[in-house]
Amino acid sequence: MDRDLLEVSVTKLHTLYRAHTYTVRQVTEWYLARIAKYNPTYKPILELDREGALKRADQEDAEAKSPAALAAKLKAQPLWGVPIVIKANTSIEGRVTSDGWTGFLQPGHELIAPRDAQIVAHFKSAGAVILGHTNMPDFAASDTNNSSAGGRTGNAYNVRYSPGGSSGGTATAVAANLAVLGQGTDTSNSIRNPASTDSLVGFLPTRGLVSIAGIAPLDWLMDDTGPLARNVTDAAIALEVMAGEDKLDDRTAGSAAKEPPQFTQYLKVDALKGKRFGVPSFILNNQGTALSSTGATRSLALRPETQAAFLKAIEGLRAAGATVVEDDTLLPASFETLLRTISTGPYRAEGFEDFLRDFGPVEYKSPAAFEQATGQKLPGFLLGQSRGNAPATSQRRLEDDPKAKEIFWDPQAKALAAYNETLERLHLDGMVYPALQMPPNDEIAPQPDGKPSTGPHSNTGWVNRIGVPAVVVPGGFYDNGLPFGLEISGKAWQDGALLGYAYAYEQKTHHRKPPVLATE
């Protein structure tokens, strides 16, 4: 089976089903066996639902015993029989939404989801077999993947190194062939960072294309969710499944009219011909600092080896027919200054309050009820406090706040306008830049400051601040064998076009190579 299933795509897997080469149960058991073999070393899977996955597989086999029934299932359900993984901050009915934190795993007080997040319901309707939840840093608040609930996840290409965060568990699981594809979330880089370190395709959709209802928020105004996959086609198929309006996420209202979820039609090998992409000046010229989801900032220079990898990777764009423009007026340092005027702090509590109200267990439907039931407080930064639990920013609801226009809506609109103006002025189809400012870091070796590793880091949180789509594609490898990821941002509500660019690059370069895994 290894010959058929290692690196298998959704399309290839469906071909195997159509030929009756394997049953869904056989495929699911193959993935469960790989998880049993490799999870003790790499630790990407936080909670395995072996019983649920096999039950689902048996149901699907029973529903498709005849060739006609099987053909009907494969036509109607784009992920039929496809084993996938879900990040641990995303609600699966009847399972614990740990958010990577031991506080939601307290015996007798677990945060057991009363229903599925909409994206999980969509995956199930599409026929996916959910293997379980993937590890993530507590509350998705780190660029690495070390959690109180699941420990440290290793990089699939070298277990000593970081897979990035906060969707590093999903990334390592998919890269290591412990699932066909997976779901991640992204507040300031958390899909794209681990996609880069694990030689994957990671897609951050236009804000509002995919619902985040049922996902434990870090900063709900910046949060998004999207797929991680080994190839662009699988990512496009998954995004078609995930997209859709949701009454619990107002941002999705009218999304189907803005961009119908028919993304695979854009996947053409010549999609890059005649396209133009700019390199953001503040990233390439080391003028910027990383924008944290918690409001913290840090100086973040582009490492020389990463700049070299980037310059090599963009040659693939040129070879596929695109033009890459470098100009000091392309999103200079003043653009980053504009981004800093967008304030989400006063509204942080609203997101977690709504999550517990709609997706918390009966025992606690609010932060106060959680504290009363468990005797434990939620971390202050989830509720608008600083990391040091300093006095909280005065919290209010976005739709009721008369200052929201001044501190959030107008600054965000100005930053988006500056981005769009740059694209229009220079006739650009998007921006291209390194997904990370540095290679994945060795988390076993002592850090220079003696503190635990928190990286690798990026300067890509600006994309979340303006709500446009971005995609990471495998862009090659560093000299030490670890992956480099190339990121391309696009125009809002042109996600399909962006996937087309990624597909054309992928087909031209074929950078992804599967990792060679180790066991303890």
Image (cartoon, rainbow, N blue to C red):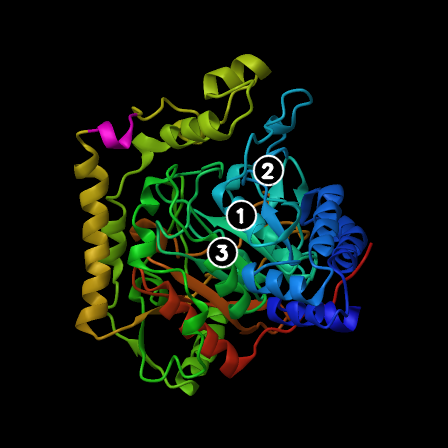
What segment carries the magenta color? 396-401
Crowdedness near tag 1: few (<14), some (14–19) or many (≥20) residues, C-alpha within 10 Å: many
Labels 1 and 2: the sequence-earlier one:
2
Q: Residue at x 55, y 20 (%)?
A: 362
**Image vertical order of residue 349 relative to residue 26, above or below:** above
Residue 302 shows in the view: no
Local packing at callout 3 (Cα closer than 10 Å; few below 14, some 14-19, many 20+) is many
- Residue 219: x and y in percent read 40, 38
Q: Disc 2 versus disc 3: distance between alpha carbons?
A: 25 Å
What type is the residue that disc 3 sits on?
A: Val
Amino acid residing under circle 1: Ser
Residue 100 numbered mark, or none: 2
Q: Residues within 10 Å of mark 2 (few under 14, many from 20)?
A: many
- Element at label 2: loop
For marks 1 and 3 on the same chain, the one whose residue lies earlier in the sequence? 1
The residue under the point 47% across, 53% down is 242
Q: Which of marks 2 and 3 is in front?
A: 3
SS class of the residue under badge 1? loop
Separation (CA) of disc 1 from disc 2: 10 Å
Residue with the mark numbered 3 = 241
Of residue 37 and residue 193, the one placed in the foreground of this image is: 37
Q: Is residue 347 visible?
A: yes
Q: State yes or no: residue 483 in magenta.
A: no
Quadrant holding the N terminus: bottom right
Q: Mark 1 sits on what residue? A: 166
Q: Mark 1 or mark 3: which is in front?
A: 3
